[in-house]
Amino acid sequence: MPADPPLFSVKMRASKQGRHISGAERICPASAIPQVSQALTARALNHPHGEPDDISLRVQQLDAVTRIPALRVQSHNVRSVDDARGFFREFLASRGYSPRALDQLLSVTGLRGAMIVDARTGQRLDPNLERGVRATCMDADTDWSLPELQHGKQHAHEAIVLASKVAHAPRIVAEFCISDDPNYTTGYLATGSVYHRIPHCKDPGSTIGTRVFLYDASHEQLPATIDYIEHTAVLVTGIELGL
Ligand code: WAQ
Ligand code: MG
């Protein structure tokens, strides 16, 4: 059998007058780098936060890529913001986890990354409180021989990729997410192999939004968890389409 061709990470970051506007990354074979570069620069130029004056594109060959299965999507028929919060609250209570994790989700906004929160105590554990921990180096396992039809940000698709990677992180037991986009009110709770999709996580127009990764282990093991989230290259297979 021929060896798999090497894979590359293509990362885009765009800013205006030093202020971050957008960022995105893909993992692809060399043959797709031109197509991916074009799609990512187009995305940078068409971002609702404005036209950037600085776009950087970085292409790096990856040493090793791990393939993991996508979480299974389960949509919930939640009708109000109160019900959505109740869903998160009941999950925590059913596991014996601290309700403070939900307070963190609803009160912290403006991070580039996620908070890592001790599931038992609700204490925040990640080292940089201004930034959080950013999950990077992941993508959907794409068939690059077919034309790509996606343009712009695909909230659910990108969230399933991120959540699937994070759910496979050692000692992460759940993730809570609310988008910071004012008009995107669907969030999720990922745990085990399921991505629970939850409408009405916030009122339309609200600027709150963040992510909480719930961690259940002794704190000495946290650096290995953060290293996986930030650095291990992961391709997510079998994402369900048509959300
Ligand atoms: N790693 C860790 N945290 C991140 C990352 C990342 N790569 N990207 C964003 N965050 C954190 C950060 O605190 C943001 O403020 C917050 O998450 C929300 O990010 O099925 O769009 O990109 O339809 O606004 C959910 C889709 C979409 C639900 C979530 O998040 C569905 C979304 P956003
Ligand atoms: Mg956002």
Image (spheres, rainbow, N blue to C red):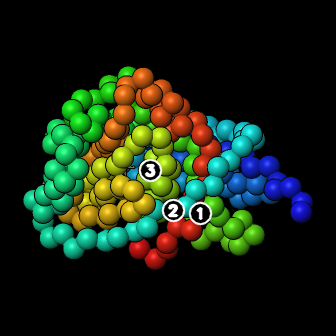
Which amino acid is tagged 3? Answer: Ala
Residue 42: quarter of image: bottom right
Q: Label 2: which residue?
A: 70
Q: Label 3: which residue?
A: 167
Which amino acid is tagged 2? Answer: Ala
Q: Spatial distance from mark 3 to mark 2, Cα to Cα?
A: 10 Å
> Label 2's element?
loop
Q: Residue at x 71, y 58 (%)?
A: 35
Which amino acid is tagged 1? Answer: Thr
**Sequence order check: which comes first, mark 2 or mark 1?**
2
Q: Residue at x 63, y 61 (%)?
A: 141
**Sequence order check: which comes first, mark 3 or mark 1?**
3
Where in the figure is residue 88, as x and y percent of width and height?
20, 54
Where in the figure is residue 207, as x and y percent of width and height?
23, 47
Is residue 77 visible in this depiction of the protein? yes
**Sequence order check: which comes first, mark 3 or mark 2?**
2
Which disc number belongs to residue 172?
none
Q: Label 1: which residue?
A: 237
225 over 84 or under it: above or below: above
Q: Is residue 184 left or right of residue 168?
A: left
Q: Which residue reaches farthest left?
A: 82
Is residue 112 visible in this depiction of the protein? no
Q: Spatial distance from mark 2 to mark 1, Cα to Cα?
A: 6 Å
Where in the figure is residue 75, as x and y percent of width and height?
31, 71
Neighbor class of circle 1 (other Cα within 10 Å; few <14, some 14-19, many 20+) is some
Q: Residue at x 25, y 60 (%)?
A: 185
62 over 73 or under it: above or below: above
Neighbor class of circle 3 (other Cα within 10 Å; few <14, some 14-19, many 20+) is many
In this rendered view, identify the residue nearer to me: 129 or 216. 216
> Label 1's element?
strand
Contact, CB < 8 Å: mark 3 with mark 2? no
Q: Spatial distance from mark 3 to mark 1, Cα to Cα?
A: 14 Å
